[in-house]
Amino acid sequence: MNKPKYRIITIANQKGGVGKTTTAINLATALAAIGERVLIIDLDPQGNASTGLGIDRKDRKLSTYDLLVGNNTVAEVAMPTVVPNLSIAASTMDLLGVEMEIGHENDRVFKMKKALQHSDANVYDYILIDCPPSFNLLTMNALAAAQSVLVPLQCEFFALEGLSQLLETVDQVRRTVNPALDIQGIVLTMFDSRNNLAQQVVSDVRQHLGSKVYQTLIPRNVRVSEAPSYGKPAILYDLKCAGSQAYLQLASEVIQRERQSRAA
Ligand SMILES: Nc1ncnc2c1ncn2[C@@H]1O[C@H](COP(=O)(O)OP(=O)(O)OP(=O)(O)O)[C@@H](O)[C@H]1O
Ligand SMILES: [Mg+2]
């Protein structure tokens, strides 16, 4: 098997609605816009990344499910999106049955890793995996396959509580299935500068996690939430809005960290 040249970043948080999918779509778009070849793997049966990138359900002939169960390769499953340089392995409801289907197999946690070790994944520079809001077998497959994990954290009161559980899971993954798993970074999402509590959350998270937290704050921005209903990333829907600009800034931080980790 070829050693992957590309970076696999899993976007995970077991808490729902914190901005995982929005981050996956817009970070992927920003990376693609500067010429990186990017694949999003939609690993959530909800399929929000696929829908948000304009992939109609009836067009999802092959999906992440086929990749996981070993029916098809990355090249066969990947579909182009409205964004040049950005492809997606779309999600279908079949993913709901994966746990039943492969749950008894010894290598059940390594299915995604194996699929991504296939030489046809080498055409990508970045592979971003969008996870469901739970630590189930799907998310564990993503964490076992990735070089790093990127954690979106919503600026709200319970943010830190959920984060400690997530960091504990990352430690557990390191001890068991993926010793090399790194934390790419923690991105604070849906920040509202008029809200004192949000300001407090930002300073608490920075105090606890220091440089692991990206400088970029993603603001709460209505254009960002409208974009998926047009089947477009916010960056295509309204490049100038504050949310799109923040995601471009986040992409440059992610790239900088990747360069540093490659040089190390
Ligand atoms: N910066 C933002 N400004 C305004 N709305 C946002 C922003 N980021 C995300 N949203 C909205 O918040 C909701 C949750 O975001 P998103 O789907 O990205 O979260 P998620 O973590 O992927 O959710 P799930 O856990 O259900 O997969 C969506 O309706 C999305 O449009
Ligand atoms: Mg999601």
Image (cartoon, rainbow, N blue to C red):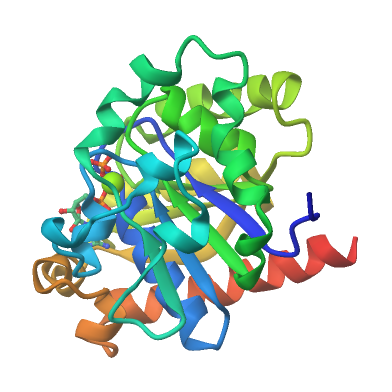
Mark yes or no: residue 117 visible: yes
Q: Is residue 168 toward the left or the right of residue 226 in the image?
A: right
Q: Residue at x 52, y 28 (%)?
A: 140
Q: Position of residue 192 (x, y in %)?
A: 25, 60
Point 12% across, 58% down: residue: 58
Q: Is residue 102 left or right of residue 49?
A: right
- Outermost residue toward the top? 104
Residue 28 in the figure: left or right of residue 4:
left
From what the image shows, is residue 41 above or below residue 237? above
In the rendered image, the vertical position of residue 93 relative to residue 264, given as above or below: above
Can you give x and y, in whole percent of width and height, for residue 214 in the image?
56, 60
- Give 86 or 172, whichever is nearer the viewer: 86
Residue 224, quarter of picture: bottom left
Most foreground residue, 213 or 42: 42
Q: Residue at x 16, y 74 (%)?
A: 223
Q: Position of residue 244 (x, y in %)?
A: 32, 78
Q: Position of residue 126 (x, y in %)?
A: 59, 66
Please give the name of the residue rendered at 31% of the width and 55% of the height, measured from the top-left corner: 90
The quadrant of the picture occupied by the C terminus is bottom right
